[in-house]
Amino acid sequence: MGTYILKRLLAMIPTLIIISVVVFILIQLPPGDIISASLASLQQQGMEVSTEQIAALRAQYNLDLPMPMQYLHWILNFVQGDMGYSIKYEQPVNTLIWERLGYTIIIAVASLLFTWVLAIPIGVYSAVKQYSVGDYLFTVIGLLGLATPSFMLALILMYCAYTWFGISVGGLFSPEYADSDWSFARFVDLLNHIWIPMIVLGTAGTASIMRVMRANLLDELGKPYVVTARAKGVRPLKLIFKYPVRIAINPFISTIGWLLPTLISGEAIVSIVLNLPTTGPLLLQALLSQDMFLAGSFLMLLSILTVFGMLLSDILLAAVDPRIRYE
Amino acid sequence: MSDHPLYEDLSTRRLTWLRFKRHKLALMSGGFLIFIYLIAIFCEFFAPYEPNWRNPKAIFAPPQEFHFFEANGNFQFRPFVYGYTLRINPETWVREYTEDTSQKHPIYFFSKGQKYQFWNLFTARHHFITTAKGQYLHIFGTDKLGRDIFSRIVYGARISLSLGLIGVVLTLVLGVLIGGLAGYLGGRTDNLIQRLIEVLQSIPTLPLWMALSAAVPVHWSPLGVYFSIIVILSFIQWTGLARVVRGRFLALREEDFVIAARLLGASQLRIITRHLLPSFMSHIITTATLAIPGMILAETALSFLGVGLRAPVVSWGVLLQQAQNFQVIVLTPWLLIPGIFVILVVIAFNLLGDGLRDAADPYGGHQL
Amino acid sequence: MSTSTILSIRNLSISFKNEISEQLAVNNINLDMKRSQTTAIVGESGSGKSVTAYAMMQLIQPPGKITSGEIIFSPAQQDSFDILQLNDNSPALYDLRGGLMSMIFQEPMTALSPVHTIGNQIMEAILTHQAIPKQAAFDLAAAMLERVGIQNSRERMHQYPFEFSGGMRQRVMIAMALVCQPQILICDEPTTALDVTIQAEILALLKELKATIDISVLFITHDLAVVAQIADQVIVMNQGRILETGSVRQILNDPIHPYSQGLIAAVPGMKRQPRLDAISNDSTRHNYGVHPLIAIKGDREVALPMPLIPAEYQL
């Protein structure tokens, strides 16, 4: 197991290097850079900026270097934990990014749990009671969840929460807790707010995982080992959970890794609608204003998160499936 | 038992069709999609107004109701709507529209209305549904500029639906080509492609889309933006398909029937066209059908964020951009109607894809 | 009759429905299994032999359906009862499955769960039917593994099926089936998926076990060579019908039914023939499958159309 994890960790390094190149190219893609953009606005306000000043500014952000050198500067600093300076927010990227990333992870993990807790029992039920009324009902709800754009779902839920419970649910905290230190009351306040993004993000995932679970389980139910267990006299409920469910769940463990990028993607858009202090809204702003250090750091960190998520799911899979463990 | 044609006597295609026909929902979805694509193709005819035409008398106006009975209870066969009276609420400054029973706007089908350029080919005036000159009809209400939502949905269908279709074709070409290549050549190429796919998949999709579409120059023409969005969406989506195709390719290469064909001396081309492709096709068609709604939803999301299609292009995502916050739902809920169409189309594609998958699976018989 | 009947099937019909047609997999069959003997059902794929065995433990699942008939089981020291009358949830059914009757399958590769240890799966069979401590169940399972010829059984209990070879897995299956001392063992083509040498080993093991345990065996196979080695009674099935029953000697040396004759002629080495004939399915379906009559002589039965019935048989 130890060597397996080590091998996987080593294999991640080239992947991460290629990702960093792709991310760097991505943030360089928009024509012009933030200096020219902010210059244009300065000049519109009637300010004179000398060519020396521009050159000095460019040199300060290494924008005068050739591309490969810019990349090297950026990635070497990044590895050392220096993510550069956000020109738009006039703050080091480090101070802007960590708290938001933390909330993104909290929301993503909460949604993941929500998805699993809901989707797997429903999937099992739908497979075992195939073509029953409940099966059809869940299929319909699942389809609706799959088909509704997440921002619409967020809006509708906000509306429902507002009209039925009279609470406004934007943000992650009530105003009085927004800037206070961590306390139990603040934590409760967080719980009061986090359920909407959790449901919104979890719904699409629930819908698809439920359907996959149903299909997987239906496949497994026909396997000979199920007949063997039935022939042994194992009671139906125990049989289903001990054998086919156990095996049908395995592929899901490997999907944790793939679910994370989806959740982070979904989180971006939901956060914008719900006005959450997570990575999504800031990333969008950074991309639109070509704040390359900020955008690059976000993309890079989210990708690293995903790569680790995949590693985690592979390790989990190896832990539950002896066939992989012994390979 | 001998009254029925024996199961094994039927051709694969006929069997597939028989199984598909049993999926009533898939069949209905197929019908619905054909219907809505027809509307998208002939949207100039089906929409009563041009998408950017403004009705100054109706800004943020709610949907009008169809009536068959006049206020005094007289029935008339031709449906009609009432015009609006506008009152601005002095306390909240909100526009409040009420039906003005003195203004009756009868609805005409297949008659002349606003002039339009059909497919940029010729000028026409006939609309599927319209009112007399000077009168107006807003089935789904209007937006902040007084534009007719129904007409905009109909025009938006052309953009959103074609985008899904073209995007999927592009995805398919990329995915099948690259995935097939990886599966066919194997070895180093396969490794390289695998790694590339892994990298692309580990960057969260939406931020990647956002980054890519933020790179589309602002000054590009709407058509340029339209195609670049398609390219961007396909650029990400092909990876999933390529993985599947590669996997199937590798698995199929080892299948006994393929080995048998090879041992019988069948040529490479014959093996690919007679054995590999048919075993693939059903799978690919299904995957494609299930990928279209993903494209449509992605366009909606990008346009909603303002990094997708931009006005004056009308797509369902652009329409939903007006529904940014939840005051919209409270004050002007009809701005969310385009979302209902998104949901319906996505569900229909999913059901159709499910039906196709079940029908194409030669081993799926036990479920039926 | 010298021995009593442990299980008798009367008028059993099983049908499978698909979207186009309904097929009778088992068509109104009658058969008797004698206590402490090995009864073999011989037939080609699709003849209904496995489906019959599955019906005996109520293991048939939709789209398959038992449309009529009864299966009377008379276990030792118990009243006889009709298995098909047992409710889906009745405790008696679960006692029957794996307790009074157990089954080994054709594919030892897939018949065991890949993610549970061998020990876990054998112990489950014990713990389902007996209220004994886990440690006792473990000892019992390990002893049973030794019994079927698996060495180091205590270590091997902790291994997974994929660490065993095909023959070993079949031994595990046999151990699992016998560990609760059932009265009937159903072997559904237990050697078909194995190499010829392994087949011989497994058959030898089954014979040896049969000699030491008092058990009635229903052996399903398409291989007459296997039948010759192991069976006491033979039932020939085709197209969901029983064509002929009799002792192994009678069937192998003196088959009456043309289908049985063809079946025996098709086995190389059993009767010398210059060329193997294919047994025509059409002829079975149309000539002697349609309106057969049952003819009996002693304990032999054969189903044939009127003109083909030998003179010494009674209808």
Image (tube, grey):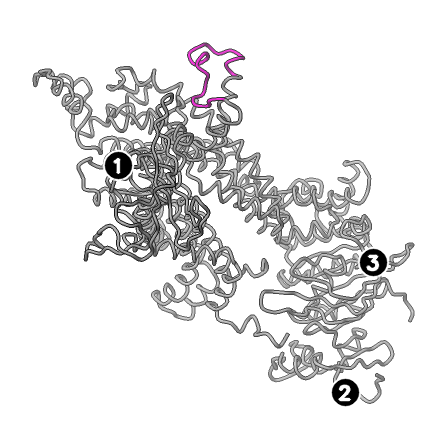
User: Does the residue at mark 1 contact the one at mark 2 (Cβ under 8 Å)?
Assistant: no
Left or right: A309 in relation to C189: left
Left or right: C77 in relation to C97: right
Left or right: B31 in relation to C152: left
The earlier-in-sequence mark between 3 and 2 is 3
Question: Which of the two residues, A114 or A178, is positioned nearer the viewer here?
Answer: A178
Name the residue carrying label 1: B56
- Is A186 a magenta residue? yes
- Is A289 a magenta residue? no
Callout 1 secondary element:
loop
Q: Identity of the amino acid at label 2?
A: Met
Estimate the spatial distance between the alpha carbons at disc 3 and disc 2, rounded to whole Å: 38 Å
Quadrant of the rendered image containing residue A65: top left
Residue visible at 45% across and 35% down in the picture: A153
Please check whether the numbered discs 3 and 2 fall on a single chain.
Answer: yes
Name the residue carrying label 2: C306
Q: Identity of the amino acid at label 3?
A: Ile
Label 3 neighbour load within 10 Å: few <14, some 14-19, many 20+: many
Please check whether the numbered discs 1 and 2 fall on a single chain.
Answer: no
Name the residue carrying label 3: C215
Callout 2 secondary element:
helix
Residue B348 position in % (x across, y down): 44, 51
Estimate the spatial distance between the alpha carbons at disc 1 and disc 2, rounded to whole Å: 94 Å
Q: Identity of the amino acid at label 1?
A: Pro
From the image, state whether disc 3 or disc 2 is nearer to you.
Answer: 2
Residue C178 position in % (x across, y down): 77, 52
Q: Which chain carries label 1?
A: B
Q: Can residue B174 be seen in this view?
A: no
Give the residues drawn in magenta, as a range.
A167-187
